[in-house]
Image (cartoon, rainbow, N blue to C red):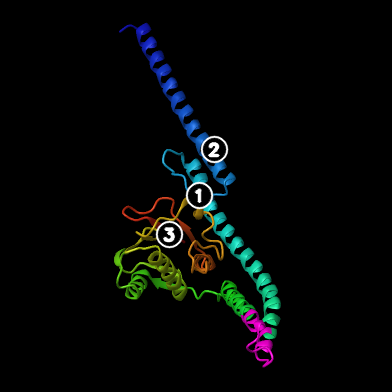
Amino acid sequence: MTEMEIYIAAGSLAVLCLVYLGIRFYRHQCLLRDRAHLMREAVRNRDFTFRLPLRGLFFGERAMQEALNDLSRDINVLTAQKEVESWQKLTRVLTHEIMNAATPISSISQAYLADPNIKGTPYEEGILAIQKTSESLSNFVRNFRTITLVQEPDMREVNLADLCHSLRSLYPDLAWHTDIAPGTCIRADESMMMQVLTNLTKNAVEAGATAMDIRWNKALYVSNNGAPIPAEVRGEMFIPFFTTKRSGSGIGLSLSRQMVVMQGMKLTLAERPMPSYHTTFVIAP
């Protein structure tokens, strides 16, 4: 091979390398652009649960993506905390106003019903209806107050396997599947976590569930095979007193979410349930 041919071959190889590097650089920039678009759309939709993969990034970009992933989690926790605090403040105001109105009505109704001049008259039935309505209103307020009277959590190391065993004993008729390694612990309030899991199981049973699945994979996944939750309900299911059941109080899920948030975690409904199940809730640190 002549010297000229060597130069031409070397030049061609250099050009090919530059073209290859140019293509790789372009594709990498497209990858970064798509990531920026996804994160921008997530923030616009107030979805702070995004966690984009780190594969294919340089070390500096990987560190930046890790920081953004962690930031999304922290924002999601803070948003949930602020939402819970807002509901608590609203609950206190409504409780105070409702009790101010209901207490005199109940007292006056009882006084009239005790009057012998009222007994046996057409007025008695109407006053009795008023009294029952005020009692129902008072019961509603008592349920309302449970959202604001949750005690501060007592954070300790909680063994998840032992917790699930206690839960299974409360619902022996359900078919249970658990996938939690022995010795797996999380820092939480044991009684609160037990109440949360009980509420989720109770809701599942009321939705016709016959099987439950609880597993741990960096988060606690609680699944059931009850009736699926309709898409139009998903955005409102954690709002206090929102319920689709005739006899439901609507505080189970909202109270559960509040207790989870108080422990520095979050309770969400998974977009896709575990295989063979219809509904999956996620309790994530």
Residue located beneath label 1 in the image? 69
Q: Earlier in the sequence, mark 3 or mark 1?
A: 1
Q: Amino acid at mark 2?
A: His
Q: Amino acid at mark 1?
A: Asn
The boundaries of the magenta stretch are: 109-128
Nearer the camera: disc 1 or disc 2 = 2
Residue located beneath label 3 in the image? 281
Q: Which mark is residue 175?
A: none
The percent position of residue 94, horizontal first and vertical second, equals 67, 70
Q: Which quadrant of the rendered structure holds the N terminus?
A: top left
**Above or below — where is 97 with respect to 214?**
below
Q: Are marks 1 and 2 in contact (CB under 8 Å)?
A: no
Nearer the camera: disc 2 or disc 3 = 3
Label 1 secondary element = helix
Q: Residue at x 36, y 63 (%)?
A: 208
The percent position of residue 203, horizontal first and vertical second, equals 42, 66
Q: Residue at x 32, y 75 (%)?
A: 169
- In depth, the one of 180 and 86 nearer the eye is 86
Q: How many marks?
A: 3
Residue located beneath label 2 in the image? 37
Nearer the camera: disc 3 or disc 1 = 3
Label 2, label 3: how far apart the Cα atoms are: 28 Å
